Every structure is written in structure tokens, then in C-alpha cells.
Image (cartoon, rainbow, N blue to C red):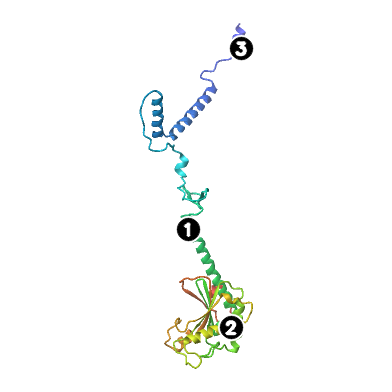
Amino acid sequence: MSDEAEDCPVCVPGLPAWLATFGDLMALLMCFFVLLLSFSEMDVLKFKQLAGSMREAFGVQNQIKVEDVPKGTSIIAQEFSPGRPEPTPLNEVRQMTVNNDMNTLDIRSEKGESDVLDSLQGEAERQKDQEKKEQAKKDAIQFAAVLSEEIDEGSIEIETDGKKTIIRVQEKGSFVSGSARLKDDYIPVIAKIRDLLLNIKGKISIEGHTDNIRADGKIFVSNWDLSAARALAVANEIFADVRIKQKKFEIVGRANTRPLAPNNTAANRAINRRVEIIIERGKDNESIDRIKVKEATDTAPSTLNSEEIF
């Protein structure tokens, strides 16, 4: 008996180790239920309906007027609440959003328009307008590179007006004063312009302009006749190439209604006597950026690039 008593292990004082783990689990479980209780809310209307049903079941006659459909409260509904869709003959309602961080979605039917769609369309139009302006500048740079010699001589000017590209043919070197016949040595210049217009997209307007001095009346009755005849002379030379699509051209005589400078000096009147070839990609009121070609130096010919021209 004494040997068996000596072999008995000594009892460790305190609770067993597994009981601490069990206590932690119970505490976590209680915290979980407390969180569930804190998230929950009581729907008063639904509680009253339930209480009324209980009263009726146990013989208590108490009528409760219900003014709203019973509904619960959801965390998701508070953060993500679709709006009311517009009437549509279709059975399909679409939700649209452009921002993943938005708390609500903009809902539109197939037929209706939404603010988000209007914003997207406006941004697309602005982007399209900007692309047209950039294309107008690129075309102007290309034209200036081909017509650099004529620009240096002062017989050609090139401008961009927003989405428009303007090739301005001055009277100097192109027409005899009071005449609508192109000089023979200027026809190759018009041929260069014609080649540039072959692959150009958009509406092209050829406009004739004069100064405020009236025509002598021998050939042309008024400046309207002279300006229209000069525009037509340039157009006929451009139309000499059968590849030119004439349906996108418009021939206009402006007389002296749109001067570039006051008609108070001979130099200003010479500026106003011109024919303009306008490539239109849209209408706007932006200021005109004139393209200027740097004067050629003795050491190297002038080169055209966007930094030098604009």
C-alpha cells in the first residue's frame, strides 16, 4: 500500500487548462450575439401587427389601422438605394453608373434620358470638338509646308479658326486688278492647293472678297459680281481634277462685306482683295491663330513644325 501511495502523481492546484479555452470561446460567442443584437432594429409597425395578431388569437378584440407596408431596415439599403425608374413600355429596367464609389445608382429606362448620360454625351462632344481643332492645326501645318514659298512671297496666308482651316489667296500675284482671270503663272499654285484638298474631309467654301472701291462697270456691274467671279475662277481651276468631289464645295461672293482691315489705305485695301478657301469642321467663335512661316536664312532653309508655326 505504501508503494502505491508513492506512485500517485501530485495533483496540480487550480482549474484544468482546457477550461480557459472553453471560457474564451464562450466569451467570443457572447460578443457575437451582442453584435447581432446591436445591429438589429425593431420595426414598430410590424411589432404592433404581431401584437394585434396575438390579441386576436387570445380573444382580445383590438383593431389596428395599418398605414404602411411592413418593411425591415437593411444596412445594404442604407448605402445602396436605387431610385425610382421612369415609365417604359419595356419590361426591362437598366441601371447605369460611371463611378464605383457612388452610394446610389442612376436608373433610366430604355426611352428616358438621365443626367449621367447627358454628362457622358457632353464630354464626348467636347472630346470630338477638340479632335477637330487638333486636326485643323495638323492640316494647316501640312498646307504651310507645301505652300511655304508662296507664304514667304505674301501671296498665300494660312490660318486656323477653331475647327476651320483657311487658305487665303491674296490678289497679289493671282489676279490683275479689276479682273477675274487667274494669271497663268499662278495656276501651278492652285494646282498645289487642289492636291492638298483631295483627301480633306468636311465642307469646303470658296469665298471671294473685294475692297470698298466700286467696280468700273465695264466687265462687272458691282463688287458682288467681281468677288463671285474670282471665287468661281479658283473653283473651276480646282475642279479641273475629276477626282475632286464638287458636292462638298460652296462658291460664295462676299464683295466688301467682310474686310480684314479698314479700307482707308491702299495697303489695307490690298489685304481685303482676296479669295479664301475655308475647310469647315464646325462653327465656333474662337480667336484666329495665324500661321507664320519663319523667313529663310542664308545658311539653312526654313522648316515647319508646330512649335515654330503656332
Q: Which residue is mark 3?
A: 7
Residue at the image position 41 percent from the left and 24 percent from the top: 57
* Residue nearer the viewer, 250 or 59: 59
Residue 301 occupies quadrant: bottom right
x, y percentage for residue 297?
Answer: 57, 82
Residue type beneath disc 2: Asn
Residue type beneath disc 3: Asp
Query: Residue 65, relative to residue 183: is it above or below?
Result: above
Q: Earlier in the sequence, mark 1 or mark 3?
A: 3
> Badge 2: few (under 14), some or many (20 or more) residues near its Cα, within 10 Å?
few
State left or right for residue 267 relative to residue 201. left
x, y percentage for residue 54?
Answer: 40, 26
Q: Which residue is mark 1?
A: 118
Q: Which mark is residue 236?
A: 2
Distance from the alpha carbon under mark 1 to that under mark 3: 91 Å
x, y percentage for residue 31?
Answer: 47, 30
Distance from the alpha carbon under mark 2 to that under mark 1: 45 Å
Residue at the image position 46 percent from the left and 44 percent from the top: 79
Residue type beneath disc 1: Asp
> Badge 3: few (under 14), some or many (20 or more) residues near its Cα, within 10 Å?
few
Kind of element beneath mark 2: helix
* Residue nearer the viewer, 107 or 22: 107
Q: Earlier in the sequence, mark 3 or mark 2?
A: 3
